[in-house]
């Protein structure tokens, strides 16, 4: 049985899911507006591991002129929610996107796949990456194990940060700014 099947989405995105459309609406508004504040309002967006497609749906409803491409490794998700079938560990888009979303994905990839995926996310991002995933610390201390898929790779924040730093400066709140694009003030960033 493929891992990301109907049962998986029912379990984590059913009535009591990890997040819903309303919550993604708040998050997507904040991310989009932070990009605008930084002077790089997105006109193209790539959603990697789009799942039930909440980010894509929000963009279609709120910013219909923004070009959104959504991809996922799950045949089920692609057929049901209309994404392109892609594995971010092996696929690098031929052009960059102003904003790349990778929400709740990288912790499913083993180490070699996660390394390639980070390189591909770096290559895909023109300005800003929004990245969310639970680290080993989060899985032990922060998440609700009843609501969260615990059968994932438990890696440290430092593991991710050191690899992401090759391409990005961490702004905070999941936002990573590609080097050489947005000049952040010293205290606006999580890292100097
Ligand atoms: C926890 S869900 C997150 C869905 C969506 N991003 C959200 O936050 O609502 C993880 C998604 O990542 C997808 N995924 C896992 N590995 C992937 C890969 N290597 N490339 C692309 N998508 C992947 C899964 O199929 C699944 O839809």
Image (tube, rainbow, N blue to C red):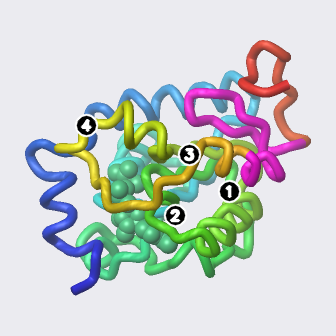
Camera-side mark, 4 or 1: 4
Mark 4 closeness class: few <14, some 14–19, many ≥20 residues within 10 Å: few
Q: Secondary structure at mark 4?
A: loop
Q: Which residue is mark 3?
A: 131
Residue 80 shows up from this direction: yes
Which residue is under mark 4? Answer: 144
Q: Are marks 2 and 4 in contact (CB under 8 Å)?
A: no
Indicate yes or no: mark 1 CB to ligand 1 under 8 Å: no
Label 3 and label 1: CA atoms lie apart by: 14 Å
Q: Residue under circle 1?
A: 97
Mark found first going from the N terminus, 4 or 1: 1
Q: Earlier in the sequence, mark 1 or mark 2?
A: 2
Sequence-wise first label, 3 or 1: 1
Q: Is residue 169 magenta?
A: yes
The residues tagged by marks 2 and 3 sit, at their Cα atoms, a distance apart of: 16 Å
Residue stretch in magenta:
162-179
Query: Residue furthest toward the left?
Result: 15
Question: Which is in the foreground here, disc 2 or disc 3?
Answer: 3
Q: What residue appears at the point 27 percent right and 47 percent down from the top-left corner? A: 148
Q: Which residue is mark 2?
A: 69
């Amino acid at each position: 049985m493929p891992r990301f099947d109907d049962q998986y989405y029912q379990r984590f995105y059913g009535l009591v899911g990890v997040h819903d459309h309303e919550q993604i609406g708040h998050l997507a508004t904040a991310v989009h507006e932070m990009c605008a504040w930084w002077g790089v309002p997105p006109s193209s967006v790539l959603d990697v591991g789009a799942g039930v497609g909440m980010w894509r749906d929000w963009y279609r409803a709120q910013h219909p002129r923004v070009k959104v491409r959504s991809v996922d490794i799950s045949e089920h998700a692609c057929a049901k929610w209309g994404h392109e079938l892609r594995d971010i560990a092996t696929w690098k888009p031929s052009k960059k996107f102003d904003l790349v979303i990778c929400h709740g994905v990288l912790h499913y990839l083993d180490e070699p796949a996660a390394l390639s995926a980070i390189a591909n996310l770096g290559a895909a991002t023109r300005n800003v990456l929004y990245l969310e995933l639970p680290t080993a610390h989060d899985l032990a201390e922060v998440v609700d194990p009843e609501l969260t898929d615990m059968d994932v790779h438990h890696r440290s924040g430092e593991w991710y940060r050191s690899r992401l730093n090759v391409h990005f400066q961490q702004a905070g709140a999941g936002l990573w700014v590609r080097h050489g694009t947005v000049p952040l003030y010293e205290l606006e960033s999580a890292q100097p």
